[in-house]
């Protein structure tokens, strides 16, 4: 089983990832600004900014543990996150779960779901096979 979770804030060209870092006073895992090039070879220009905070737990951790890790860091910033979403940023919790067909079940208990519901952003689950 491989898992991971990332909290993402996306903003249009008027909303920067750097300002999210300043407002949250929290170091992101990655940021991308609107107007930046996408990759080194592509001529495409990024249309939106993106602020990412990813769990740094090992990929064989439970998905719930990744989400708890993120929530422990983001819950103290909940008011600011709600303010950012009211200003037009879009929030989500992007989760990956890759497993063999009969290997593992993902459990998200009521306590975790209550914590997520108190925060901005939809829960996105990318569930796939773990093919070598």
Image: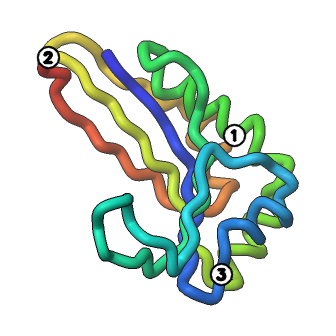
Disc nearest the viewer among 2 and 1: 2
Location of residue 81 (image quadrant):
bottom right
| Residue at x-position 49% and y-position 59% | 122
What's the distance in space between the residues labelled 3 and 1, CA to CA?
Answer: 23 Å
Q: Is residue 70 above or below residue 31?
A: above
Q: Earlier in the sequence, mark 3 or mark 2?
A: 3
Q: Is residue 49 above or below residue 86?
A: above
Q: Is residue 80 left or right of residue 16?
A: right
Asked if residue 122 shows in the view, the reply is yes
Quadrant containing the N terminus in the rendered view: top left
Quadrant containing the C terminus in the rendered view: top left
Disc nearest the viewer among 3 and 1: 3
Q: Please provide percent x and percent y for residue 9.
A: 59, 64
Dot 3 and dot 2 residues touching (CB under 8 Å) = no
Q: Please provide percent x and percent y for residue 36.
A: 50, 73
Q: Please provide percent x and percent y for residue 52.
A: 58, 52
Local packing at callout 2 (Cα closer than 10 Å; few below 14, some 14-19, many 20+) is few
Which circle marks residue 132 in the picture? 2
Q: Please provide percent x and percent y for residue 110.
A: 57, 35
Mark 1 element type: helix
What's the distance in space between the residues labelled 3 and 2, CA to CA?
Answer: 39 Å
Local packing at callout 3 (Cα closer than 10 Å; few below 14, some 14-19, many 20+) is some
| Residue at x-position 35% and y-position 21% | 2
According to the picture, the residue beneath numbered tag 1 turns out to be 71
Q: Is residue 110 left or right of residue 128?
A: right
| Residue at x-position 33% and y-position 30% | 97
Q: Earlier in the sequence, mark 2 or mark 1?
A: 1
Mark 2 element type: loop
According to the picture, the residue beneath numbered tag 3 turns out to be 15
Check the image and name the residue furthest to the bottom. Answer: 14
């Amino acid at each position: 089983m491989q898992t991971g979770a990332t909290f993402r804030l996306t903003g249009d060209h008027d909303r920067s990832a750097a300002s999210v870092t300043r407002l949250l006073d929290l170091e992101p895992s990655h940021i991308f600004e609107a107007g930046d090039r996408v990759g080194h070879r592509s001529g495409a220009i990024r249309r939106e900014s993106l602020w990412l905070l990813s769990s740094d737990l090992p990929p064989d951790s439970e998905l719930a543990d990744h989400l708890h890790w993120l929530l422990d860091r983001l819950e103290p910033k909940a008011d600011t996150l709600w303010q950012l979403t009211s200003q037009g940023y879009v929030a989500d919790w992007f989760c990956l779960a890759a497993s063999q067909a009969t290997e593992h079940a993902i459990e998200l208990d009521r306590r975790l779901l209550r914590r997520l519901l108190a925060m901005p952003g939809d829960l996105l689950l990318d569930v796939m096979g773990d093919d070598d």
